[in-house]
Amino acid sequence: MNNFNFYSPTFFVFGKGRENETGKYVKRFNGSKVLIHFGGGSVIKSGLLDRVKASLTSQGISFEELGGVVPNPRSGLVYKGIEICKRKKIDFVLAVGGGSVIDSAKAIAMGALYDGDFWDFYTGKKIEKALPVATILTISAAGSEGSMGSVITHEDGMFKRAANNDVLRPVFSILNPELTSTLPDYQIACGVTDMMAHVMERYFTNTKNVEISDRLSEGILLAVINEAPKALANKDYDSLANLMWAGMVAHNDTCGVGRESDWATHNMEHELSALYDVAHGAGLAVMFPAWMKYVMHHDVMRFAQFAVRVWGCEMDFQNPEKTALQGIERYEKFMTSIGMPIRFSELGAKAEDIPTLVKTLGLGANTLGSFVKLTEEDVKKIYELAV
């Protein structure tokens, strides 16, 4: 196990109706003038936004509103939010929505305290401070409600980049599983795919002797595999609650401490969703099996372990490669069973666009990932495996 630092200060408020306590927690964390950031009409139609505003008003907290976040959140709205924060002297950003809203809110929070272009933080500049961010989660997926990351698509070139720093972890997050009960099946399935991918990015590692985080990762994956079909079939509270908490623990780095993580698949998917505007989870469902097949021989026993412990495959000690491939096949079948694509064609992606995807990834002479350090030629071959 590697040395590590782990700091996860988010205060979680979990359960039915907890959004009605928003004002109390904003006050607890010293917010006095809030930017409420949200997406489309669902938070309005459901009455969630009105409940949040009523809670803030009851505590004497003033607020501004900025809606319009779209999947794969865009830089243009971030610039608008930063301008509002500076002009209105906002001291707290409240994200009401899913991962895209939270990512956008974090970007606004950084930019509000910075004199330059917020995009600097997505191209390598160190993040030193941000306005406090809180979240009211409406979809179980990205885990942004407990993570230190944010991903934004820049509209000048339509490419996605990430920024990460502990100052971006939400100061509090309200998680009411009931808010996910009206989601379409496709969105739930995309969320399931995303949280599983967050675990697998950490699970496939070169770090040895990480039994604790291996078992945590496997347990999260098994729970998600068990709960997802029930959530899709019944939208019952308990399965939705288990998925909501799984999404958080999958990405707050609990199962990533002390081990090297990879993230090549996420980065390759970012270019897919930026170019084709597909759901992030759907893109991951396509890219992860392709990556697995390409890198499997680097550590076939880790893939065999994944097959046995997560997917219940029988270990073939004479031919561990066979076991590893069975695990990948069962992962693909699970993706299909919950309505996810596993091929380029199902996304509307095209083989002829692969050179564009590779180029916008911007690797050049550098490599991608850590489990296997991928060159541009490797990335090209993985995209081709996904066709």
Image: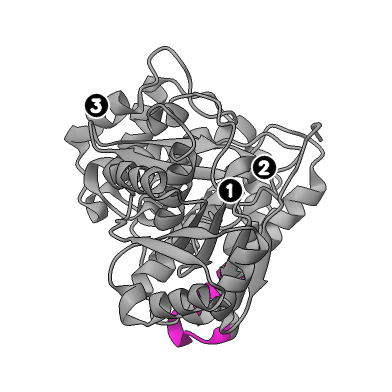
- Where is 106 relative to 243, above or below? above
Name the kind of residue labelled 1 in the image: Met
The reply to whether residue 309 is in sight is no
Tell me how many marks there are. 3
Q: 214 and 334: which one is in front?
A: 214
Q: Residue at x 64, y 41 (%)?
A: 166
Q: Which residue is under mark 2? A: 302
| Residue 26 drawn at (x, y percent) | 59, 64
- Where is 247 relative to 274, above or below? below
Q: Which residue is under mark 3? A: 355
Characterize the local packing of mark 3: few (<14), some (14-19) or many (20 or more) Cα atoms within 10 angstroms. Answer: some
Q: Which residue is under mark 1? A: 200
Question: At numbered mark 3, what does the secondary structure look like: helix, strand or loop?
Answer: helix
- Image quadrant for the N terminus? top right
Q: Which residues are magenta?
A: 223-237
Colour style of the rendered protein structure: one colour
